[in-house]
Amino acid sequence: MNDIPAMMQAIDPEVHGGPEVLTLVDRPVPTLQPGEVLIRVAAAGVNRPDVMQRKGAYPPPPGAPTIYGLEVSGEVVAMAPDVASLMIGQPVCALVAGGGYAEYVAAPAGQCLPVPELMSMVEAAAMPETLFTVWTNLFERAYANEGDTVLVHGGTSGIGTMAIALCNIFGVKIIVTAGSDEKVAAAKSLGADHAINYKTEDFVERVKDITGGTGVAAVLDMVGGDYIPRNLKCLAEDGRHVSIAVQGGARATIPIFELMMRRLTLTGSTLRARDTAFKAMVADELARTVWPHAEAGRLKPVIDKVFPLAEAPEAHRRMEAGDHVGKIVLTMG
């Protein structure tokens, strides 16, 4: 504990705005609460909710740090007295409710996973947010199973590339959408069975063609708005639609009679505000069912670009431009 400083550098703007508000500031190193470990951060993933928070559209849940960042990798340097396992010195990646864009972060011990030997710290930092999100929504809420066909929008995003990887591992056929021919090619090269350029093709008709008119078992959607009724047309009977973001609008007109006649399920979730008990339960399930594939080198995130923490504005600009394929990551000095 003697080498842990009192202060650290972090991204914690006091105002909302453009990427230029993401300047380095000095903040106290977090004080551990029961059940937490202190991580000396090596790298932090950049996610769409970070951009929304910067714009003032996604405030941290009560009690969460105002410092940005929902996932990190690094070394455990301190533990709360009630943490049962000896974790000091262990390289971990962790899902956090905030605080990742900093040199140190406090994380619930139950939300940490050990960094596999075959995975770099940059790769490990890009795992938790998309892994927890895709697993809980596509494989748990939507019940995607071996032999199913699913539709995932944003195929070259962090969520999309993680969905492709997991579907390949667990025998699920995946159709994705993307916004350019280059991204369509990238998605296919990463293992998507089919990729649709939504700007030049009608994804509803293409899904119908691909599935022989039967539709997909599940849709994972981050667009919302007028995509919802179109997505429902892509579903097979008894199909499941899961919303995880509303980038295209928070309201939709739903054909209720169609849901009734075809026994469709329309659901969704957010992750950040869920309690630590739920996230720890998910982490435990991932450790048992998914992490062995990471340890064997079969599961890795797609890394688009890496920036030092001081260049967080550039990282956000790249995300907002929409040109990235996979995850954007910040590294500490």
Image (cartoon, helix red, strand yellow):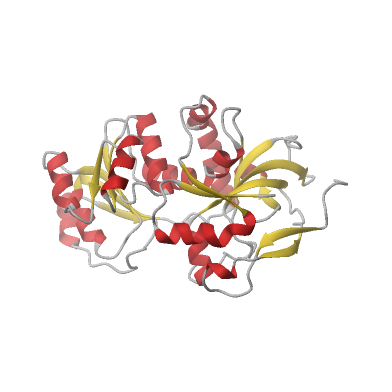
The percent position of residue 120, horizontal first and vertical second, equals 59, 35
170, above or below 251, in the image:
above
Q: Quadrant of the N terminus?
A: top right
Q: Look at 72% across and 41% down and name the residue there.
A: 76
Q: Which quadrant of the structure image shows residue 184?
A: top left
Q: Look at 77% across and 47% down and name the residue there.
A: 80
In this rendering, the count of numbered labels is: 0
2, above or below 245, in the image:
above
Q: Is residue 24 visible?
A: yes
Q: Look at 30% across and 37% down and name the residue there.
A: 188
The percent position of residue 244, horizontal first and vertical second, equals 39, 55
Pick the residue in front: 285 or 311: 311
Q: Which quadrant of the structure image shows residue 172?
A: top left
Pick the residue in front: 281 or 165: 165
Residue 97 as seen in the image, left or right of residue 251: right
Residue 320 as seen in the image, left or right of residue 212: right
- Residue at the top extreme? 296
Residue 118 as seen in the image, left or right of residue 30: left
The percent position of residue 196, horizontal first and vertical second, equals 23, 47
The percent position of residue 160, horizontal first and vertical second, equals 37, 46
Q: Which quadrant of the structure image shows residue 42?
A: top right
Residue 74 as seen in the image, left or right of residue 134: right
Q: Is residue 99 visible?
A: no
31, above or below 117, in the image:
below
